[in-house]
Amino acid sequence: MTASLHGIRFSVLDRSRIRESEGAPAALRDTVRLAREAESLGYHRFWVSEHHGVPGVAGSAPTVLAAAVAAATSSIRVGTGGVMLPNHRPLLVAEAFGVLESLFPGRIDMGLGRSVGFTDGVRRALGRGKEDAERFADQLAELLGWFTGAQTAHAEVHARPAEGLRVPPFVLATGEGASVAAEAGLPLVIGDLRDRERLRAAVDTYRTAFRPSVWAEEPYVVVSGTVAVAGSEEEARRLLVPEAWSLVYARTQGEFPPLPPAERVEALAMTERQRDLYEAALTGHVYGTEEQVGSALEQVVAETGAQEVLVTTSTHDRAALRDSYRRLARLAHLADGAARRR
C-alpha cells in the first residue's frame, strides 16, 4: 500500500443486484455471504441499499437486510446506503435503527438519502411525490431529535428504544445534500467518481460550511463509486459490462433489469444511441490491475481528501466480483486492520 492510501478506510455497499435466471432470494442471500467475506477481508463497513419496484434490485427493505447481515457477521460495521428518508416517517426510522443498535451495539450505521421512488407509479404506491425530497433537511432534523430527545414535532412522544442511543448518521449526496450534511454536522457520503469536478466542488462546499455537532466534531468524507480489480485491465473493464447494459436498458426502456452475462451483452447488436449510452456508462470508473487501481485511488483521495472509500461494484459473475474485492483488499492491506479488529 502506498503512503497516500495509508489510514484510508475501505467499505462495501451492496445493492443486492438480481442476476438473469436467478430470483430475488438468491440475490439477498448472496448479499449476506458477501458481507461475511468483506468482514474476513478487513473492510470497515458493509452497507445495503433501498430500491422499490425495480426488477433488477432485491434490496427494498434495508433495515431488515441489515439485521440479517449483522446477525451473520461479528465485527464489521453494518448499515444502510441508504434509507431514503422521504419515503418514511422519521419516528419509524428511528425505531428501526434503535432496535438494530440494541441488538448489535456499536456496529450499526445510519446512512440516509433524499431520493423518492424511481417511477411515478412507485411514488404513488409509497404515497410520496418528487416534492417530498425537498423536505429532507427537516425530516433529518426530526429523525436526529428522536435519538437525542430534542425533537419538538411530537413533544409527548418518545422513540423507543432509539432515544439516548448514538447510531452514527451519514448523509448520502450527489450534490445538494452536501450542504444539508454540513449544516447538520454529519459525515458525508458522496459519489460518483465519474464527475470529479462536481465531486470536488461538493466536497469543498461541505468542508467550508460544516458546523460541528453532537454527531461529528469535524468533517468526514466518504467517496463512493465503482471499483473493479482483475488480472488485466480488459478483465476488469469486462466486470463493468453487465451494469453498463442495465443502465442503457433503463434509459431506453424505462426499466432497470436483472444483470445479464457479459458475453451476452458483448454479442448484442446495439443501435447507435444504445452504443453511445453504453460507452458512456463504462467511462470514468476506477478499474484495472491492482497497480492501476491503486494509483487511481491515490488520485481520488488526493483530490478529495476523503477519509474513506465506499465501493459499490455490481456484475453478473459473482466469482469475479469476489476476486475483485479480494484484490482491492490486498492492494490496500486491509487484512492488517482485520487482524487488529479481531
Image: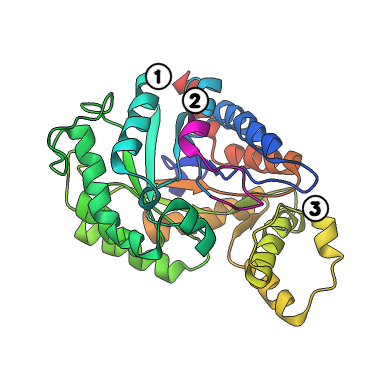
Does residue 125 appear left or right of residue 29 in this picture? left
Residue positioned most to the bottom? 272
First of labels 3, 2 by sequence position: 2
Task: Residue 157 in the image: state x and y as whole percent.
Answer: 18, 32
- Image x and y of residue 54, in percent: 61, 53
List the residue tagged with mark 1: 103
Q: Measured from the top left, where is residue 232 in percent x and y?
A: 75, 53
- Segment tinted magenta in the rendering: 52-66
- Secondary structure that dominates the magenta span: loop
Front: mark 1 or 3 = 1
Q: Marks 1 and 2, how far apart in space?
A: 9 Å
Q: Earlier in the sequence, mark 1 or mark 2?
A: 2
On screen, 270 above or below 207?
below
- Compare residues 157 and 163 and report the one nearer the observer: 157
Residue that appears at 64% across and 49% down: 314
Q: Amino acid at mark 2?
A: Ala
For label 3, the residue is 261
- Disc 2 designates what residue? 70
Q: Out of 282 and 108, give the one closest to the viewer.
A: 108
Is 241 contained in the magenta span? no
Q: Is residue 61 magenta?
A: yes
The tally of labels here is 3
For image coordinates 53% across by 49% down, the residue present is: 51
